[in-house]
Image (cartoon, grey):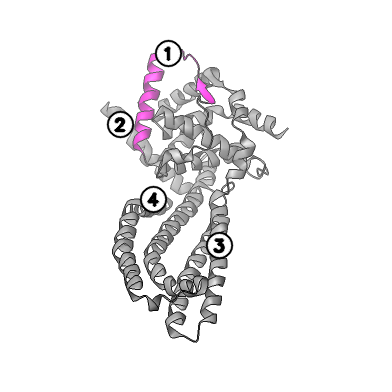
Amino acid sequence: MEKDKFISVIKDYQNLIYKICCSYCSNAENRKDLQQEILIQLWNSFSKFDGRAKLSTWIYRIALNTAITFYRSDSKHSNKRVSIDAAIISLSDFEYVPELDENIAMLYQFIEKLNEMDKALILLYLDDNKQKDMAEILGISETNVATKISRIKKFLKEQFSNN
Amino acid sequence: MELEELKSAWAQYDKKLTMNLKFNEELLRKMNLEKSKKEMNAPLIYEIISVTTGIIFLAVIASATIRYSYELKFLLPGIITSIIVAIWVYNSVSKIKLLSNIDYYDSPIVELQKSINIFKLKYQKSKRLELYSIPAFAIAAMPILGIALRNFDIYEHPIRFIVGIVLALLLGYPGTIWLYKNLYDKKIKNATNFLEELSKFEREE
């Protein structure tokens, strides 16, 4: 069944969706709404996925596009098309690893300072995507990706050294 | 912290997420995903309804204008009203065209965001045009609709006509300007700024 197949794909890519939501929404309520919006958009386009692009490329494109549109929307709550109180993807009791968690928390804070397009770029970079895939997902040249990555790296380095 | 260290910390974080993220399958099923599929084209449906209503209205106005074309006092407002309605219909058709050209599912991020923001800009600008033309429409439509629908010649009741014009001008324009400033002005600026940001992002620097 299409829905079962969809659920299994979402399960495989839940980390990606979770990280995108955390990067674009610092507010928990908005994060939950964004998560629902991403799932709706993925579901709406699921039958149109023809395998020409990689599944991950397709998911990144839709999830990041939805996040950017949500972030830029004039009224974030107008996107609420279904009312589900809890988040579909949530974190269970997280075992605290001080150094790791502090660095990640700081990283999220610095990502928050980037504009929405740079946020997309750094997420793709941190998730270890190849420059070619990043260029394909974003729709810019590989040289452009490299230039921008080095600028964002410099920014993040400065942010970490200032803290 | 070096960026390579950061990348490895991010990979560790990803592993941690894999172990700790809870996926609520039941909640996802409860979302009634099938229903959301139908809701997708709401803006498109709205514009299609606008075009259909506009065309019907245009037909009514045009036929009334032809019927009373022997009198300049009806012909002129009829032509003005028809032009205004035709512009509204044209605007809706171009919005449908823009909406149909947006490929939500197979476009790179920059391309899709550009299409969305060009549509937003076009939408807000056409709202401005629609709002500003409402008072002119009301004044021009009074004589032709009066005679066509109720056989009522407003020129024979100059006081009523003047009151109508004054109301349309005094309340209509300040009202539409206020509405526009508060509803659309900021949205136009946001869309324009984001389009500029996207062009900058596309350029290799």
Magenta region, residue range:
A88-114
The residue wearing badge 2 is A159
Vertical arrangement, residue A66 with respect to residue B84, above or below = above
Left/right of residue B38 with respect to residue B161 in the rendered view = right
From mark 3 to mark 2, how far is it between C-alphas? 56 Å
Which numbered disc, 2 or 1, marks the residue closer to the eye?
A: 1
From mark 4 to mark 2, how far is it between C-alphas? 25 Å
Question: What residue appears at the point 67 percent right and 42 percent down from the top-left corner?
Answer: A47
Image coordinates for residue A116, horizontal then vertical, percent: 41, 41
Mark 1: few, some, or many residues within 10 Å (few <14, many ≥20)? few
The residue wearing badge 4 is B194
Q: Which mark is residue B53?
A: 3
Question: What residue appears at the point 49 percent right and 64 percent down from the top-left corner?
Answer: B91
- Amino acid type of the residue that numbered disc 1 sits on in the rendered structure: Tyr
Q: What number of labels is visible?
A: 4
- Amino acid type of the residue that numbered disc 4 sits on in the rendered structure: Phe
